[in-house]
Amino acid sequence: DIQMAQSPSSLSASVGDRVTITCRASQGISNHLAWFQQKPGKAPKSLIYAASSLQSGVPSKFSGSGSGTDFTLTISTLQPEDFATYYCQQYKNFPWTFGQGTKVEIK
Amino acid sequence: EVQLVESGGGLVQPGRSLRLSCTASGFTFGDYAMSWLRQAPGKGLEWVGFIRSKDHGGTTEYAASVKGRFTISRDDSKSIAYLQMNSLKTEDTAVYYCTRDLLILGPTGYYYYMDVWGRGTAVTVSS
């Protein structure tokens, strides 16, 4: 199975900050990577697929990059509604696997 | 509006069975693959299984943790995907989500990714 490792596991940031989350795959996955946002008590929401393609309706402050084993999710200007947990996920091979999540908290 | 609604969750004893349903609306259900995922209390996301559309064989994939106990099926006439869970264990306690899976062309072939999620249904396995 492909293991996904996210860092950091949590971070504190202020409104207006630029935030970057990294995700590393245990083997090359090309660009077959998605990012999801989950707020407490809510279902996850799709943000990005194919490492850098924005899901329809997702604001452009979210961006993704990377290929192979190393990926990043960037939130350009953090807003109050962006405080949530973010997960990366590979869909190159079954079983699909997720990173452990990164909780973005208010500083 | 594209929507997925899970139902059928509840409290069940270890060793018993439960069937979850995922009712879709707002899109042509039969054209899409579907997945089930779960999230144990306070934990991260875990993919459970997947079913292809009938046009792509209607075949299934499962996580090792549920293979042989869980079965995914679909009724395209009703726009419903099912998750049949047998021989339930306490570690199956989780919120279960279904997703619509979009087929996209990548650099090395066709792949699926999860673009729409339902709100989830809670399953508690306890005596």
Image: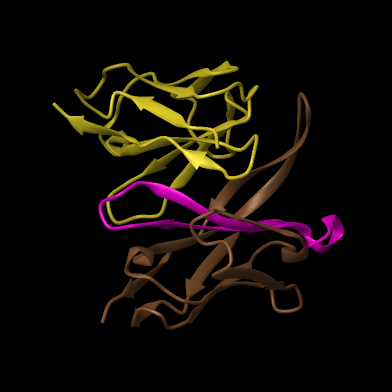
Q: Is residue B30 left or right of residue B14?
A: right
Q: Which chain is yellow?
A: A
**Residue located at (56% from left, 43% from top):** A96
Residue A31: x percent and y percent? Answer: 63, 24
How is the rendered protein coloured?
by chain
**Front one among A2 and A36:** A2
**Residue located at (72% from left, 64% from top):** B29
The magenta-colored residue range is B31-58
The quarter of the displayed image where residue B96 is located = bottom left
Decide: is B58 above or below A87. below
Q: Is residue A55 left or right of residue A44?
A: right
Q: Which quadrant would the C terminus of chain A be assigned to in this image?
A: top left
Residue A67 visible, this orientation: yes
Q: Which quadrant would the N terminus of chain A be assigned to in this image?
A: top right
The quarter of the displayed image where residue A27 is located = top right
Residue A100: x percent and y percent? Answer: 36, 37
Residue B122: x percent and y percent? Answer: 36, 70
